[in-house]
Amino acid sequence: MHIAAGDSIDLQPLAAVALAAVGCALGCVARDLTVGRFRARMDRADLGVLAANLAACVLAGLASSAGGALGHLLVAGVAGGLSTWSTLAVEVAGAIRARRWSLVALHVPGACALALAAYVAARALAGGGS
Amino acid sequence: MTPARRIALVAIGGAYGGSLRLFATGLVPAAVDGSFAWSPIALLLVNLSGSLLAGFVRGLLEAREHGRELDGTRASGGRTPEMQTPEVRTPEVRTSEVQTTETQNLSREGDRRDGLNAFLLVGFCGGFTSYSGFVAAAVAHAAWIAVATLVLCPLAALLGMRLSGGYPARPAGTAR
């Protein structure tokens, strides 16, 4: 796209960032609603974060072979926004401070193993290999 | 805070965080050496800095909450209304005015806190860091990324809570 005589900018990275931003906004809102639902029904926000992270790993696995715009939107955007490390890290930090080691075990090695299994299974299902 | 406002703040924060993550883990490594070889390390740094910021914000919010409770106690001379003797109670009309102003202040402060939580913690930090990206990086690249992230991110969040200054070194008595 020419913006001045002789000058041109590559719009591809900008489009990728824009798609990721839109997908991430959608993913973040979906995560917030999921966590809110878990908090209201079970008083367990941490399980909401876990559910959102697992759903995002399944989505990332299923869309891992998708390239281009769809890949940016779904993998970098929606799955990236739906999943989070920061909230999980804060939950784990709180569990460490309260010495609730069963919660730490659930959210650190337990959630990681579940997420890895979900991602690999979804990727295999989508035909991307394991 | 209305649900619509919260959703808008989360979405805007998420859009900023997500685009910054893509910039840091995709565009910068590609621009540095023309490949994505540095992407997993960039994602580890993103998750660490996001966890540190999230811990800091959480600590800040809890410190504000703690400070508000202290202010309330100080304003009543360290006594709850039930503990005050009738002679020190203010006249009814004045009490009502004070209570209205305090309620408005508390509501405004609560809105500000909820807004900060929605935009920075849920939106920006949540969108900036990525669990699915971490899992994909661990599968595609190296297990050490997984181990480093699992160990360091909670520690970064703890450090952030400490740096915020308001978070007590140990939880006071009961489990959180």
Image (cartoon, coloured by chain):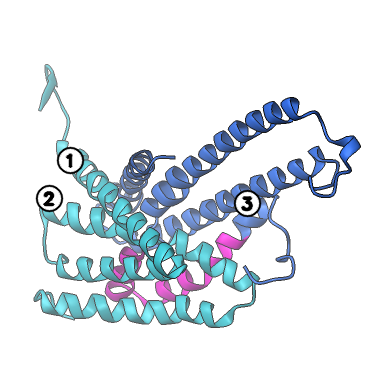
Chain colours: A cyan, B blue
Residue corresponding to mark 1: A15
Task: Give the distance between the C-alpha atoms of the residues marked 3 and 2, in whole angstroms.
Answer: 40 Å
Secondary structure at badge 1 equals helix
Magenta extent: B131-158
Q: Is B118 situated above or below A120?
A: above
Secondary structure at badge 3 equals helix
Within 10 Å of disc 1 (Cα), the crowding (few <14, some 14-19, many 20+) is: few
Which secondary structure is most common in the magenta stretch? helix
Quadrant in the picture for the C terminus of chain B: bottom right
Total numbered circles: 3
Secondary structure at badge 2 equals helix
Across and down, in percent, residue B79 comes to 84, 47
Chain where mark 1 sits: A
Q: Is residue B156 magenta?
A: yes
Across and down, in percent, residue A30 comes to 29, 55
Q: Is residue A80 magenta?
A: no
Of tags 3 and 1, which is closer to the observer?
3
Residue type, numbered disc 3: Glu
Residue corresponding to mark 2: A69
Callouts 1 and 2 close, C-beta under 8 Å: yes
Q: Residue at x 56, y 60 (%)?
A: B157
Residue type, numbered disc 1: Ala
Across and down, in percent, residue B109 comes to 58, 37
Within 10 Å of disc 3 (Cα), the crowding (few <14, some 14-19, many 20+) is: some
Which quadrant holds residue B86? top right
Q: Which is more N-terminal, label 2 or label 1? A: 1
Callouts 3 and 2 close, C-beta under 8 Å: no
- Judge by depth and name the residue closer to the eye, B82 or A93: B82
- Judge by depth and name the residue closer to the eye, B96 or A35: B96
Residue B62: numbered disc: 3
